[in-house]
Image (cartoon, rainbow, N blue to C red):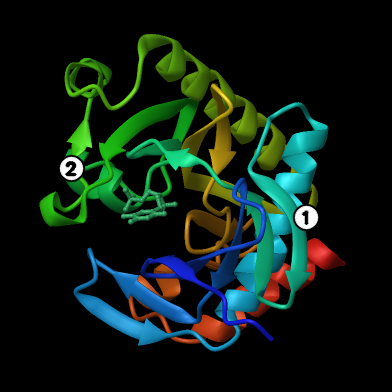
Amino acid sequence: MEKKTMLYEGKAKKIYATEDPGVVLVAYKDDATAFNGQKKGTILGKGAINNRMSAMLFTLLEKKGVPTHFIEQTSDRESLVKRVEIIPLEVIIRNVAAGSFSKRYGVAEGTVFDLPTFEFSYKNDDLGDPLINESHALAMGLASQVEMDQIRAYAHEVNRVLREFFMEKGIDLIDFKLEFGRWEGRVILADEISPDTCRFWDRATGKKLDKDRFRQDLGNIEEGYREIISRLED
Ligand code: TMP
């Protein structure tokens, strides 16, 4: 078979060209990093699980009217997606305090918000993905006002859809990070939606079923990933 041309290698995924210039192949890796790459490890089976979960959730979101880059899953750990120009913003919605929110503002982890919060980070590894506001992003030309408004609306819609979907599976969606891309003049949802990019807590026990098991050395990391995907595929 013809050797695929790799276009980009990130911390958790590789991107390959296909014969169609408008389509790329995403290959999910088992590599895991935290704290801007300072902590490194491997989570066996993670790539396949993140691929399956992203495929499932992008398909659900498309059905609910949120456009995504997802085309189809082609193997255990690979999917075809539309080639987009990534907007360098990490878009984060939180339903419950955890992670950097708890640390930054001194709010106890587990504090439930009346309304979801919305924030951006500037996606820039050299700077450690700093928190920025909308006027900063506009000033830096990272996105237009129209794109910002679209991103905010889609992010809240993703939260409504996913929160309900996970609740039915007995899981609380605590927070998550999205990335958007430009495609044919529009903004569409890109990247992945997985236990690497979301916090999932078991509703009954509060058990963490996401990458915090790796970030915080909680043990049973692979088991957490396997448990969440098996709940979704039940
Ligand atoms: P935070 O509480 O560390 O800011 O994380 C918020 C959410 O974003 C959480 O669900 C994990 C996710 N996330 C990423 O997907 N990538 C990252 O690099 C970081 C720091 C967080």
User: Real-space Cα distance between discs 1 and 2?
Assistant: 33 Å
Q: Are marks 1 and 2 in contact (CB under 8 Å)?
A: no
Q: Nearer the viewer, mark 1 or mark 2?
A: 2
Which residue sits at x=52%, y=17%? Answer: 150
Is residue 110 visible to us here?
Answer: yes
Q: What amino acid type should be assigned to the residue bearing mark 2?
A: Pro
Question: In the figure, 195 relative to 172: above or below?
Answer: below
Give the labeled residue for mark 1: 169
Which residue sits at x=76%, y=69%? Answer: 74
Mark 1 surroundings: few (<14), some (14-19) or many (≥20) residues within 10 A: some
Q: Residue 208 appears at what percent x and percent y? A: 52, 66
- Mark toward the start of the polypeptide (1 vs 2): 2
Q: In this rendering, would 183 be left or right of 231? A: left
Q: Which mark is residue 202?
A: none
Count of number-bearing discs: 2
Q: Secondary structure at mark 1?
A: loop
Q: Secondary structure at mark 2?
A: loop
Which residue sits at x=52%, y=51%? Answer: 191
Ligand 1 closer than 8 Å to label 2 CB: no
Mark 2 surroundings: few (<14), some (14-19) or many (≥20) residues within 10 A: some
Residue nearest the observer in this picture, 136 or 112: 136
- Farthest residue in the left direction? 127
Give the labeled residue for mark 2: 130
Q: Residue 2 appears at what percent x and percent y? A: 64, 82
Q: Quadrant of residue 47?
A: bottom right
Q: What amino acid type should be assigned to the residue bearing mark 1?
A: Lys
Which residue sits at x=54%, y=29%? Answer: 155
Residue nearest the observer in this picture, 182 or 155: 182
Question: In the figure, 96 relative to 41: above or below?
Answer: above
Q: Residue 194 appears at what percent x and percent y? A: 57, 59
Question: In the figure, 141 relative to 218: above or below?
Answer: above
Is residue 167 visible to us here?
Answer: no
